[in-house]
Amino acid sequence: MRLAAIILWAISWSCLPLVALAQEPLPSWNASPRKQAIIDFVKRATTTGTPDFVPPGARIAVFDNDGTLWSEQPMYVQLAFAIDRVKALAPKHPEWKTQMPFSAVLSGDLKSLASSGERGLAELVMATHAGTTTDEFQAIVKEWIATAKHPVYQRPYTECVYQPMLELLQYLRMHEFKTFIVSGGGIEFMRPWVEEVYGIPPEQVIGSSIKVKYELRDGKPVLVRLPEIDFIDDKAGKPVGIHQKIGRRPILAVGNSDGDYEMLEYITAGEGLRMGILVHHTDGEREVAYDRASPFGRLDKGLANAAGLGWQIIDMRSDWKQVFPAKR
Amino acid sequence: MRLAAIILWAISWSCLPLVALAQEPLPSWNASPRKQAIIDFVKRATTTGTPDFVPPGARIAVFDNDGTLWSEQPMYVQLAFAIDRVKALAPKHPEWKTQMPFSAVLSGDLKSLASSGERGLAELVMATHAGTTTDEFQAIVKEWIATAKHPVYQRPYTECVYQPMLELLQYLRMHEFKTFIVSGGGIEFMRPWVEEVYGIPPEQVIGSSIKVKYELRDGKPVLVRLPEIDFIDDKAGKPVGIHQKIGRRPILAVGNSDGDYEMLEYITAGEGLRMGILVHHTDGEREVAYDRASPFGRLDKGLANAAGLGWQIIDMRSDWKQVFPAKR
């Protein structure tokens, strides 16, 4: 080994990310103007001495979860969780047999469940997500997510995540971006597993939440989950959640539905280098093709206005070589 | 230069923190059982292969701000800010001349102001902290904090921070701790300056907040600050704020008043290695000696129960070589 090689080895050994940088970025993305736009954006943000340069601390990227990082069809994963919880808790609630929306869940009548609307879904979430301590709820989520399977792909839900998005998250972090989830889904439904699956720690997750209350039980401090909405992190709630939890405006936002519209609008209206991305679910073969008419992840206003606002629309069918990770 | 020296140089050049580790830790702290307990705690948390080892991601430390990281006497800094804002806004509010608590502020009658109680202070904060956009409020705070001076020390408030605490923050981060502020103070009053002063980025600040609303003004997205409480991050609110914003239980909590009691109780009751620290303001010469009788930063229950709960009580007078940073 020559001296220069030894020095390089010593440096690279202590700075592994530098080695990873040499690999081809975003391997599951086909060459396209969208892929090129992402790579150009990251290059501009990280090139010192240019007007577009963004210091590492301000390189904040926010990602929606349902339909952006993982599948939201045939229904939100959290709804599948709530349905399983209703079934598990039913023996203690004989009244649910005749009480909507629980009766619809127990009889498998998803159409009636859907017709119970937001109010019905909120009741479902309250009944199944409240009443425990935060530690107990975390254990319930961990067990469910480790065992439940996606009804179509017959794989754990945590494998129904989008491989190209896993690569994008990693690519951004390699360039000193801090990656956050900003989801309409429940924050405590995501935190127990997102670090392992996406590499995003619990403190970088923003989501909808119910209130919790601090109390002592047998002298031991616990936080009890209350049946009361704390925050809905959807639509105009997303910029609010970002402001309250992050406190500065991210420079990159990735979403897939009109629930992400205000988030992208807020982020891309900021000064300096900005990027907004919408994932368009166009792949009826490898996943599900849906947009304007879908009850989950409806995308209408975003499709209509993206071009005028300079947002990138990812065409899943043509832009992604692979949708889900290879089976283990 | 011999080969081994070159390799060491190359590694250390690319891993500067390793060099810093070689310096004496916490130089402004006198040798004491408290200083030793902190060093032992960090050593135990970071020594792999032992039962006390804590992986870097879980090395989360939370710090109160007022009275823990900076001076809270003769009054909370944010109250001084609110008073200055009342004076600045008074020409637009002739009714304040005869309306409590504003009239007390304008006539300099701090005793009447104090007697207006929490309700009066809340009114003061609402009137002076709401009504602007978040960007406007940030600019107001930045200007004020850059120009206002502490009435006793005649230095900018950002220099009335505790040098030993700056060193503790840095020492923890050097050992891959993530440091957070968890303060009863307003989150938007802290975020504009804490990164520069404490090295804590805005997204690692938890505090009290008012509600904000997303709207378009002339087609431009803004967040408007509303005169409505969103969250009070004090007492039993602190563990709640920690749970909602961080999502896992920190292993180290540092505070100075009974407002931090539940935070320390919650953190130190967790499993595994834990540490709770209270700063006791015992130094009437270099700062202010106060505890049980103080209107700001009252410390009573904490003093009474700390020993039984295994919390460390820092004696400012004897434990700290230096209180404030050297003048620039």
Image: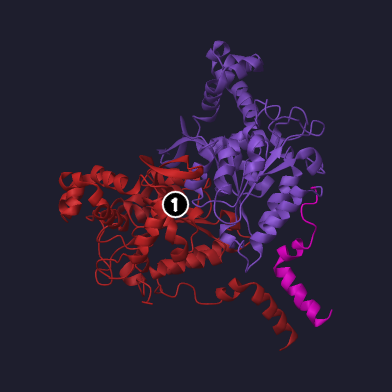
Chain colours: A purple, B red
Toward the top, the furthest residue is A98
Q: Position of residue A82 (x, y in %)?
A: 60, 27
- Is the residue marked by circle 1 packed among few (<14), some (14-19), or many (20+) residues within 10 Å? few
Question: Who's the residue at 30% across and 50% down the image?
Answer: B301
Q: Residue at x 25, y 64 (%)?
A: B289
Q: Residue beneath label 1, please?
A: B135
Query: Residue at 23% of width from left, 51% of height from top?
Result: B91
Toward the right, the furthest residue is A1
Q: Quadrant of the C terminus of chain A?
A: top right
Image quadrant containing the N terminus of chain A: bottom right
Asked if residue A114 is positioned above or below residue A184 in the image, the reply reads above
Residue B324 picture location, percent across and down: 35, 71
* Disc 1 chain ID: B
User: Secondary structure beneath disc 1?
Assistant: helix
In this view, A97 is above or below B220: above
* Position of A320 relative to B14 (above/below): above
> Magenta stretch: residue A38 in it?
no
Please name the amino acid that badge 1 sits on.
Answer: Asp
Q: Answer with left or right where residue B81 lies relative to residue A152.
A: left
Q: Is residue A27 magenta?
A: yes
Residue B65 seen from this side: no
The residue lying toward the viewer, choosing from B297 and A75, is A75
Q: Quadrant of residue A314?
A: top right
Depth check: give the residue in front, B239 or B213.
B213
Magenta stretch: dominant SS? helix
Q: Which residues are magenta?
A: A1-29
Percent position of residue B230, x then y: 40, 40
Please indicate whether residue B190 sits to the left or right of residue B107 in the image.
Answer: right
Percent of width and height locating residue B20: 56, 74
Q: Quadrant of residue B163?
A: bottom left
